[in-house]
């Protein structure tokens, strides 16, 4: 199992960052069959071969993903995509 952690600062505030995280989760659910739910200000998600969480703070977002055996071979590519997506998401 491979683990990916990415953190980014933002100036959106918790409410706006949470709304963006919800929008992102909806897109991931439709494109990649990701299931998700909120636990306070943390969005927990799960799909076959991967699960994780997006912690939304007032000025920071932290993404943690655990990849199963098959997806762990793509770990560096997935991390780059998360970093790019997070930068676009917070931009």
Image: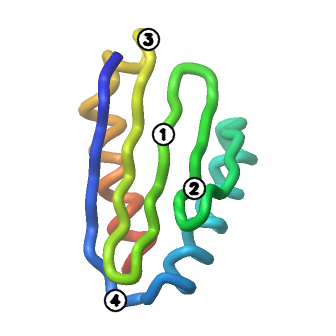
Dot 1 surroundings within 10 Å: few (below 14), some, or many (20 or more)?
some
**Tag shown at residue 70:** 3
Q: Do the residues labelled 2 and 1 touch (CB within 8 Å)?
A: no
In the figure, 71 relative to 29: above or below? above
Label 4 vs label 3, nearer the camera: 4
Q: Residue 19, position in %: x, y?
A: 62, 77
Residue behind mark 4: 11
Instruction: Classify residue 40 by image quadrant.
Output: bottom right
- Measured Cα–Cα span from mark 2 to mark 1: 8 Å
N-term mark: 2 or 4: 4
Residue behind mark 2: 43
Instruction: Say which element carries label 2.
Output: strand
Residue behind mark 1: 52
Classify the position of the C terminus by image quarter.
bottom left
The structure residue drawn at horizontal position 31% and vertical position 16%, both measured from the top left corner, is 73
Q: Nearer the viewer, residue 5 or 40?
A: 40
N-term mark: 1 or 3: 1
- Measured Cα–Cα span from mark 4 to mark 1: 23 Å
Q: Do the residues labelled 4 and 3 touch (CB within 8 Å)?
A: no
- Measured Cα–Cα span from mark 4 to mark 3: 36 Å
The structure residue drawn at horizontal position 41% and vertical position 59%, both measured from the top left corner, is 85
Instruction: Say which element carries label 1.
Output: strand
Q: Are marks 2 and 4 in contact (CB under 8 Å)?
A: no
Instruction: Classify residue 70 by image quadrant.
Output: top left
Q: Residue 49, position in %: x, y?
A: 53, 20
Q: Indicate left or right for 36 with 49 as reference.
A: right
The structure residue drawn at horizontal position 68% and vertical position 47%, both measured from the top left corner, is 36
N-term mark: 2 or 1: 2
Label 1 vs label 3, nearer the camera: 1
């Amino acid at each position: 199992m491979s683990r990916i952690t990415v953190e980014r600062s933002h100036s959106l505030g918790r409410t706006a960052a949470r709304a963006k995280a919800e929008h992102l989760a909806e897109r991931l659910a439709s494109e990649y069959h990701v299931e998700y739910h909120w636990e306070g200000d943390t969005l927990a998600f799960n799909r076959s071969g991967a699960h994780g969480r997006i912690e939304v703070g007032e000025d920071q977002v932290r993404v943690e993903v655990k990849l199963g055996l098959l997806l762990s071979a793509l770990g560096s590519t997935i991390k780059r995509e998360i970093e790019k997506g997070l930068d676009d998401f917070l931009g």
